[in-house]
Amino acid sequence: MKPNLKVNIGRLKLKNPVLVASGTFGYAEEFSSFIDLKQLGAIVTKTITLRPRQGNLPPRTCETPAGMLNSIGLENPGLRSFLKDKLPRLAAYGVPLIVSISSERDPREFTELARALDKIRSVAAIELNISCPNLGKGTLISQDALATYGVVKEVRKSTKKTLITKLSPNVTSITDIASAAEEAGSDALALINTITGMSIDVASRKPKIAMASGGLSGPAIRPIAVRMVWEVYQKIKIPIIGMGGIIDTDSALEFILAGATAISVGTANFVNPQTTVEIIDGIEDYLKKNKINSLKDLTGSLRC
Amino acid sequence: MIYQTKARIQLNKEINTGYYLCVVKSNEIAKTALPGQFLNIRLTADGSPLLRRPFSIHKVNGRDLEVLYEVVGEGSRIFSQKKPGEYLDVIGPLGNGFSLPTTNDQPRLPLGTQGGQGPTTIIVAGGMGVAPLLYLAEKLAYSLGHMAYSKPLVLIGAKTKNQLLCGKEFKALGCQVKIATDDGSKGFKGRVTDLLKKILPQAISHKPLAIYSCGPRPMLKEICRISNQYDIPAQVSLEEHMACGFGACLGCAVNTIDGYKRVCKDGPVFEAANITWRE
C-alpha cells in the first residue's frame, strides 16, 4: 500500500511534507530545468518587501565548513513587480504557494503586504520573515517575544490566509518566541532561519563577505536546528516546518522525528537541485519499509 | 535548456605545473554549449567542500567538454585527483556567453578591412582567464569564415613564461598570437593590457569589431578603459564565488549601470561598459 504523505499546515493541505526554504529557490522558475515543480509539497518564495530592494554589497556569499555564509540582503523586485511579473508563473505550477514577506523599516509594512496578498487567490499562505539577519539591524523582531507577538497579532487581523512565522535561532530561548507567535495567532512556525556567523580571509585580513557577518546555513547548522525543533515541539501545539541543513532523506526524517510536520530544503537546493524530489521518494520508501501508513504517525515519534 | 547530468571523465591530466585539463563526456551539454558558458561541477558527495565549483567551458569536441583549471584550493585539488572512468555530477551549460559579430556588423567596417588586412576581433587573456577564450576563438575563426575577414588576434598574458597557456591551440586555429609576461621571460615585458595599448594604434585603422577578454578584475577594468578610449566594444567574462550557479541564490552579484546583476545567469559575460568597476 502506498503510504499517505499528506500533511496539514493550518488550513493548508499539502500532498507531501517537502517544501523549499525561502531565498533558496528563487521564484521557482530557476528550478524548472531540474525537477517537476508539481511534485513539491509547496513552494515558498524568496522574501518580498513593499518596495524593491537592490540587496547588499558583494561579495555576498562564502563557503564555510559543511555550510555557507550569505548576506544577500533580501534583494527582491518589491510587491508590485512580484504580483505582476512573478506571481502569474508561480500560480501556474499548480503547487500551493507560500509567499514570504518582510518589513524593512516599519513592522506595519507586514500588515500592508499581508493585506495585499490576502486578496489573491493563488496565494495559499503567508510566511512572516521576522528573522532575516541581513538587514543591518541591531535587533530582529524574532529576537523579542513581545515584538513577535505584536507583529503576528497585527498581521493576523489583516488576513485569513494561513500564517507561518519564521523564527531566528539567534535567541536565548527559542520556545519563548515560539509561544509568543502561537499566542498571537500564527497557524504554524518555520524554524530555523540562518545562524549569524562570520568568516575571515587571513591573507587580506578582511571578512570574506562584504557585510562582515551573515547567515550560516547548510549541514553545519543541522544539529542546532533539530534541537530547536524538538524543544519547540514539546512546548507548542501548532505545526512546525523544520529546516536547517537538510540535504537528504535521513536529515529530513530527523526533523520529522523531532516534531516537524513538514520540512524545507534550503542550501541543498544549490548543491543538488533535485534534493527535494529525492527526499519525497525517500520518505515514502522509509514509511513503506517501516510499515507506517501515514507520515503523521511519524511526526514527533522520537524515542527518548 | 540546462542539464544536470553524470558525466564520465575521459581524461584528467596536468598539462603544466598546477594546471589541469579535464575532458568529460556529456552529449546533451556539448550539443548546446556556447562560448563563454560554464559548468557547475559537484566534486564531493560528503559535503566537504559543500558547494559546486564553476568552470568555464574550454572547448567542445563532439560529445566531449573540456575544462582547463588551475589547482588553487580544496575544490580544485580534489578535482585534480579524479581519474578517467569516474563520473562527475555536472550542471550546464550555464550563463550567457559571448555574442559573436554577425554579418550585420559588416557595414560598420571601413573599406579595406576585408581580405585579412587587420584583425576583425581581438581576444585578450590574462592568466587562467584563457580558459573560456579558446572555444570562443574557434567559433570566431570558423563561423565568421564566410565573411572573409581575418581570424582573431589573440593576446595572452601571464606572470611568467611557465604559466602561459594555450598558445599552440590558438595558433592551430590560424589565429595570430602575441605574448606578454610580467617578468619579460617571453614576449612583451609587461601586462597584456599594455601590449593591447601598444598594438591598438596600428590596428585601429581597420577598426576591430570587438575585444573579448577574461582575466583578473583589475585587468578587465583596464580593458574597459581601453575599449572606451578606442571606441571598440568589449565583452568581458567575470568570475565570482557562486552558491547555485543558475540564478536562484543571488549570491554572485555584480554592480552594473542597471543595478546588481547575477554573474551566473545574467553573465558571466557582460559588456565591459555596463559594469560599475570598483577598486
Image (cartoon, rainbow, N blue to C red):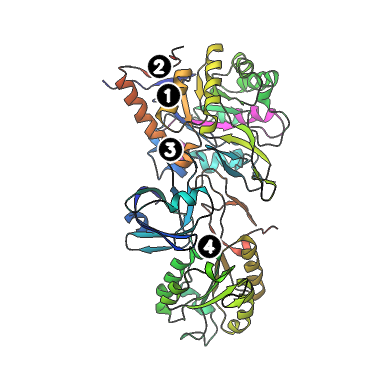
Q: Which residue is mark 1?
A: A253
Q: Earlier in the sequence, mark 2 or mark 1?
A: 1
Say which element carries label 4. helix
Q: Chain of mark 4?
A: B
Say which element carries label 1. helix
A180 lies left or right of A40: right
The question of residue B115 being in magenta is answered with no
Q: Nearer the viewer, mark 4 or mark 1?
A: 4
Please tell me which residue lies in front, B107 or A119: B107
Q: Chain of mark 3?
A: A
As drawn, the label of residue A298 is: 2
Q: Quadrant of residue B68?
A: bottom left
Indicate the position of residue B2 as horizontal and vertical percent values.
Answer: 40, 50
Q: Quadrant of residue B273?
A: bottom right
Give me the C-alpha separation between circle 1 and circle 3: 30 Å
Report the span colored magenta.
Answer: A89-114
Q: Nearer the viewer, mark 2 or mark 4?
A: 4
Considering only vertical position in the picture, is B188 above or below A234? Answer: below
Residue plotted at (53% across, 62% down):
B128
Q: Which three-letter amino acid code belongs to the residue tagged 3?
A: Ala
Q: Which three-letter amino acid code belongs to the residue tagged 4?
A: Met
Say which element carries label 2. loop
Mark 4 is surrounded, within 10 Å at the Cα level, by few (under 14), some (14 to 19) or many (20 or more) other residues, namely many
Do we see residue A174 in this rendering?
A: yes
As drawn, the label of residue A92 is: 3
Residue reaching furthest to the right: A138
